[in-house]
């Protein structure tokens, strides 16, 4: 256990489904991140939230919708996905801004998404 | 845009040998970090080196930083089969972006 919990660990969904990924941290961190990891590709930073405010949105398609109700929880809502969206989705948190110069990320174990 | 880019993409060595991986980046940084990922799992932080440091050790890990060349290296000494994983670097600029990583295989 890293202190960052992602659920579900595995998800299979059809292209017309609506599902959500959940991330929870109890480390007292103020920043939370979503990354996408596809086979043989660099980790793609999708969204960043700092103190519940979105600070980064890297041209992610609107079929991915993040939600950060508080500093401990982060969701990624999924709808009308494409097969190429199949990937490992990683959540991370960090004490960004709380300790200057030491923005170390703690990752969850990931949610493996398969879109049929 | 990517900040850390690792080289080589893949590295295969025998147990007991040393493994060296390199990282290049593009802009000035405050610190650089190395992470490890076992297959299909989340990344785990290994070591952080600040821009005013040139070398740092942690157990069998040795990290160097050359800010003039915008590069860093990670050396794993006396490698073990359990070191088999992907290794990533990231800088603190532009929200912790990672490269494709170096896939290290240590053969028993």
Image: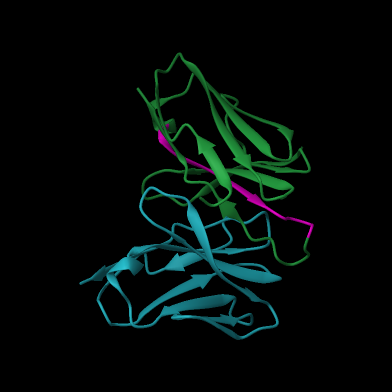
In the displayed structure, A20 sits above or below A43; it is above
Q: Please tell me which residue lies in front, B90 or A3.
A: A3
Does the rendering let one see residue B1?
A: no
The residue at the point 62 percent across, 56 percent down is B96
Q: Please tell me which residue lies in front, A21 or A35.
A: A21
The residue at the point 58 percent across, 68 percent down is B33
| x and y, in percent, of residue B97 in the image | 58, 55
Residue A63 colored in magenta in the image = no
Does the rendering let one see residue A19?
A: yes
Residue A16 occupies which quadrant of the picture?
A: top left
The residue at the point 36 percent across, 46 percent down is A39
| x and y, in percent, of residue B70 in the image | 59, 76
Give the chain coloured green: A
| x and y, in percent, of residue B18 in the image | 34, 82
Residue A93 colored in magenta in the image = yes
Of all residues, the one furthest to the top in this rendering is: A16
Of all residues, the one furthest to the left in this rendering is: B108
In-image side of A70 versus A107 (left or right): right
Q: What span is in magenta?
A: A86-98
The residue at the point 49 percent across, 78 percent down is B73
Q: Please tell me which residue lies in front, A41 or A48.
A: A48
Q: Colour of chain B?
A: cyan
Provide the major secondary structure of the magenta segment: strand
In the displayed structure, A35 sits above or below B12; it is above
| x and y, in percent, of residue A8 in the image | 47, 31
Of all residues, the one furthest to the bottom in this rendering is: B54
In-image side of A102 versus B23 (left or right): right
> Which quarter of the figure is the C terminus of chain B placed in?
bottom left
């Amino acid at each position: 256990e890293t202190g960052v919990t992602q659920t579900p660990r595995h998800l299979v969904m059809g292209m017309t489904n609506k599902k959500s990924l959940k991330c929870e941290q109890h480390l007292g961190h103020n920043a939370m991140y979503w990354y996408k990891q596809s086979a043989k590709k660099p980790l793609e930073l999708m969204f960043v939230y700092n103190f519940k405010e979105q600070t980064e949105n890297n041209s992610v398609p609107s079929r991915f919708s993040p939600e950060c109700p508080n500093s401990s929880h982060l969701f990624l809502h999924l709808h009308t996905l494409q097969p190429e969206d199949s990937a490992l989705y990683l959540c991370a948190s960090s004490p960004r801004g709380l300790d200057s110069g030491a923005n170390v990320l703690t990752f969850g174990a990931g949610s493996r998404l398969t879109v049929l | 845009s990517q900040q850390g880019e690792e080289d080589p993409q893949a590295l295969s060595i025998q147990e007991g040998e040393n493994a060296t991986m390199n990282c290049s980046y593009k802009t000035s940084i405050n610190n650089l970090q190395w992470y490890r990922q076992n297959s299909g799992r989340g990344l785990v932080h290994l070591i952080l080196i600040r821009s005013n440091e040139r070398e740092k050790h942690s157990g069998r890990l040795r990290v160097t930083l050359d800010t003039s060349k915008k590069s860093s290296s990670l050396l794993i000494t006396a490698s073990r089969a359990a070191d088999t994983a992907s290794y990533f670097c990231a800088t603190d600029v532009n929200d912790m972006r990672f490269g494709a990583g170096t896939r290290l295989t240590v053969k028993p």
